[in-house]
Image: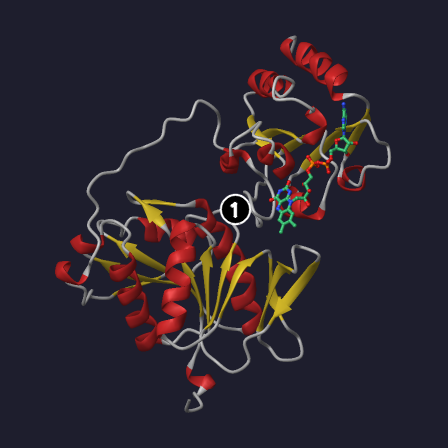
Amino acid sequence: MAEIDKNAYKGVWVYIEQVDGQARGVGHELLAQGRMLADKLGQELAGVIIGHNVEALAKEVFASGADKVYLVDAPELAHYSTDGYAAVFTDLIQTYKPTAILLGATNDGRDLGPRVSCRVSTGLTADCTGLDIDEKTGLIAWTRPALGGNIMATILCPEHRPQMGTVRPKVFKRPEQDFSRTGEIVRVASKVKAEDIRTKLVDVIRIATASVNLEEAEVIVAGGRGMCTPENFCLIDQLADVLGAAVGASRAAVDAGWKSALNQVGQTGKTVGPKIYFACGISGAIQHLAGMSSSDIIIAINKDPDAPIFKMADYGIVGDVMEVLPILTEEFKKI
Ligand code: FAD
C-alpha cells in the first residue's frame, strides 16, 4: 500500500450518535475527551452529525466543546443504516481528512466504526476505556482491556490515518455545557440515494421495561453469586425499588439465570457510572470492576472481609447480604 501523507490529516472528530434528533450521552462524553486530545495536539475538535432534521443538535455539540460541526442532513438518513451512514462517513473522511475519530461503543458505533475504518484502510481500537496522547509519538494512545481483562493494553496507530476507536459509554463524564460557545457548521450534501440502502426500517418496537435504565441510572443495586438463590435476589429488587434504583448483576448471577443479560455489569456487560453503586455478594473480579469502577460512590456488602471489592469500595459492610439488605431497605423506607 502506498504511504500516506500523515501531515494532510488534521483535527479530532467525534461521531454524534442520535436517535429521533436526540444525541446519545456518549457523544457528549467523547466531546469532552476529544477536546482534551485536540488541545494537546493544538488542533480543532469537530462533531459529525448525520441524520434528518438534526441541525438543532449543533448547538449542543458546540456547548460540549466542539469548534466545528460537519452536518449531513437528508431524508434517506433519517434512521441509522449501515449502508447509508458508512457511505456518508467515508466520504467525509476522504474529503476533510481528520487525524482521529472517536465513536461510542454502542450498537450503532460498533457497526459503523469498523466498516468505515476498513473502507479508508485504517485500523480501529474497539471498546476503549482510556484515551490520551502518547508523549513520545504524539499519537492517540487508545487503552482497552485485553486478554480477558487481565491487562490494560495501550494501542497506537502509527502507519495509517485517521486513527480510529470506539469508546465505551459512561467511562467518561459528560462535560459541563457552555451554551455561549458557537462554531462553524459545514453542511455537506449526501451522495446516498434511497436505492443504495439495502435494508429498510419497517417498524420500531420499543421494549417496555419496568425498571430504571441501567446505563442512565444514578443509583444501582447489583447482586452477585453471594445472593445464593433466585428467590434471595428479590432482596436486591426490594432495595432498588425503595431507592428508585436500577438493578445490576454480576456475570455469575446472570449465568445462574437469576437476572437477564441486560442487567449484567462488566467487561462483557454494561459499563455504568452511577452516583452510587451497591455491590451485594459480588467478589470484585477485574471483569466486573471494568464495568462499574467509574461510579462516584461504591458501597460493598460481602461476608468475606478479604473480598477484592473492598479495595475499590468507598464504604464496606462485612456481613451476610440476607441480613444486611432487609435492614437497609427498612431504613431507607423511613427517609
Ligand atoms: P463470586 O466471584 O463467586 O463472588 C461471590 C461473592 O459473594 C464472594 O466474594 C463471597 O464472599 C460473597 N458472598 C457469598 N455469600 C454471601 C452472603 N451470604 N453475604 C455476603 N456475601 C456473600 N463478570 C462480571 O460480573 N461481568 C462481566 O461482564 C464479566 N465478563 C467476563 C469476561 C471474561 C472474558 C471472563 C473470563 C470473565 C468475565 N466475568 C464477568 C466473570 C468474572 O471473572 C467473575 O467470575 C464474576 O464477576 C464473579 O461474579 P460474582 O462476584 O457474583 O461471584
Q: Name the residue under label 1.
A: 176
Q: Which residue is drawn at 47% across and 53% down?
A: 105
- Give the residue type that dot 1 points to: Glu
Q: Where is residue 178 in the image (x, y as percent from the top left)?
A: 46, 49
Q: Does residue 194 appear left or right of residue 159 in this picture?
A: left
Question: In what quadrant of the picture does the N terminus appear?
Answer: bottom left
Colour scheme in use: secondary structure
Residue farthest along the right direction in this orientation = 305
Q: Which residue is drawn at 68% across and 60% down?
A: 152
Element assignment for label 1 = loop
Q: Does residue 315 appear left or right of residue 116 in this picture?
A: right
**Corner quadrant of residue 131:** bottom right
The answer to whether residue 44 is above or below residue 242 is below
**Corner quadrant of residue 297:** top right
Q: Residue at x 62, y 18 (%)?
A: 239
Q: Where is residue 203 in the image (x, y as percent from the top left)?
A: 22, 39
The answer to whether residue 40 is above or below residue 152 is below
**Does residue 36 show up?**
yes
Q: Where is residue 145 in the image (x, y as percent from the top left)?
A: 63, 58
